[in-house]
Image (cartoon, rainbow, N blue to C red):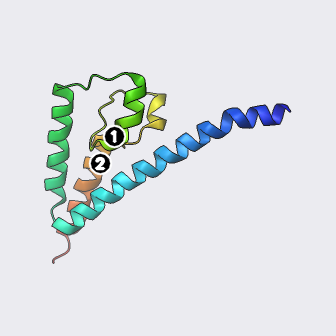
């Protein structure tokens, strides 16, 4: 009985963590795909910086229920803050995305198309 109770508590948390991890992986994949198609990862990194600056200048005014239901639809995560809650974030940190794109540009720079 106790095992069942623990599973009822742990299973939804594990499912949420897995869903968020898959979403973050897809974000990285979309960045990689866009950079490969355009052959210009720095342009995508620049666009991400601009989106991040705009999202900080005009903060999103939502309640918790709305934020959790709509965060996955944004290019840049409108919910800011670094905490344990980032484990459940559907978006990877913008700095990480930009760093990966810059590394991709360095790697692409050594190859010719």
Residue 12 image offset from top left, x and y in percent: 62, 38
Residue 35 image offset from top left, x and y in percent: 22, 62
> Which residue is depicted at the point 19% across and 50% down?
45
Occupied quadrant, residue 5: top right
Relative placement, left or right, of 26 versus 105 is: right
Relative placement, left or right, of 71 versus 4 is: left
Which residue occupies the extreme right position in the image?
A: 1
> Which residue is depicted at the point 20% across and 74% down?
111
How far apart marks 2 and 1 lie (CA) works out to 7 Å
Picture quarter with the N terminus? top right
Q: Can residue 82 be seen in this view?
A: no
Residue 82 image offset from top left, x and y in percent: 39, 28
Characterize the local packing of mark 2: few (<14), some (14-19) or many (20 or more) Cα atoms within 10 angstroms: many
Picture quarter with the C terminus? bottom left
Which secondary structure, mark 1? loop
Which secondary structure, mark 2? helix
| Residue 93, numbered label | 1
Q: Which of 98 and 37 is in front in this view?
A: 37
> Which residue is depicted at the point 41% across and 53% down?
25
Q: Nearer the viewer, residue 63 or 101?
A: 63
Which residue has dot 2 on it? Answer: 97
Which residue occupies the extreme bottom position in the image?
A: 113
Residue 4 image offset from top left, x and y in percent: 79, 36
Q: Nearer the viewer, residue 63 or 52?
A: 63
> Which residue is depicted at the point 23% across and 61% down?
34
Labels 2 & 1 near each other (Cβ < 8 A): yes
Relative placement, left or right, of 78 versus 38 is: right
């Amino acid at each position: 009985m106790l095992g069942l109770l623990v599973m009822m508590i742990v299973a939804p948390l594990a499912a949420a963590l897995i869903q968020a991890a898959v979403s973050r992986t897809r974000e990285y994949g979309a960045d990689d795909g866009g950079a490969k198609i355009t052959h210009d990862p720095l342009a995508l990194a620049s666009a991400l910086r601009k989106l991040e600056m705009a999202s900080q200048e005009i903060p999103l005014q939502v309640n918790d229920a709305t934020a959790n239901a709509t965060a996955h639809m944004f290019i840049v995560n409108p919910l800011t803050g670094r905490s344990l809650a980032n484990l459940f974030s559907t978006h990877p940190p913008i700095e990480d995305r930009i760093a990966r794109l810059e590394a991709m540009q360095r790697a692409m720079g050594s190859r010719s198309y």
